[in-house]
Amino acid sequence: MAYQLSNSIKSKIEREAAKYPSRRAAVKSALRYAQQDHGWVSEEVIEAVAEILQLEPIQVLEVATFYDMFYTDPVGRHQIRVCTNVSCMLRGADVVMDHLKSRLNIDVGETTDDGQFSLFEAECLGACGNAPMLVCSDRYFEDLSAEKVDEMLAILG
């Protein structure tokens, strides 16, 4: 059975599409809404978004695979994205990443066995003055150390 967007998500997408002269301009927002609802952007989600925006599925897939904020494979409940750009790397992002790999017993791009956490690298997340940092489930964690990472995991776990 094909994935069905909820009426709430359909309404959000329609409101977003109405803002633009072309419905294609709403793809990124539509994918964000659908991913929040479904957890990731499956082939069925792409088809559902394409249908509501009256686009070809390939037009939606192009956006879903271009932006690293969209997950085209299942992910954990919490997606941890560690900034590995210059400022963060100079201030210890490698230590943070190694600590997360060790604590979660996963590598970059993997999900914990219990489905709680997925770990990713991210390019600049815009908090260079408070490096190293990460984003987890739309929440910023800055000035990180191994201890702060442990505190974050305790809160989320």
Image (cartoon, helix red, strand yellow):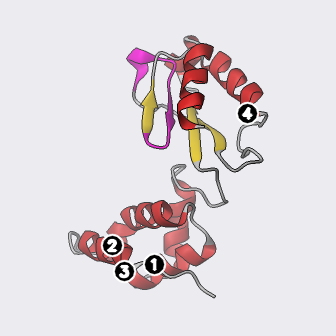
Tell me whether the residue at label 2 lies in contact with that at label 1, contact meaning CB atoms closer than 8 angstroms: yes
Q: Position of residue 136 (x, y in %)?
A: 51, 38
46 left or right, relative to 115:
left
**Which tag, 2 or 1, sits closer to the chain's start?**
1
Q: From the viewer's perspective, is residue 34 above or below residue 111?
A: below
Q: CA distance from mark 4 to mark 1?
A: 33 Å
Residue at the disc numbered 3: 7
Identified by mark 4, the residue type is Leu
Q: Residue at x 33, y 72 (%)?
A: 13
**Which one is nearer the viewer's eye here, 140 or 151?**
151
Residue at the disc numbered 4: 104
Q: Residue at x 48, y 31 (%)?
A: 124
Residue at the disc numbered 1: 5
Q: Is residue 49 magenta?
A: no
Kindly tell me whether residue 83 is visible in this rendering: no
Kindly tell me whether residue 92 is visible in this rendering: yes
Q: Is residue 130 magenta?
A: yes
Instruction: Please name which of the two marks, 4 or 1, marks the residue nearer to the observer.
Output: 4
Q: CA distance from mark 3 to mark 2?
A: 10 Å
**Tag 4, which secondary structure?**
helix
Residue at the disc numbered 2: 13
Identified by mark 1, the residue type is Leu
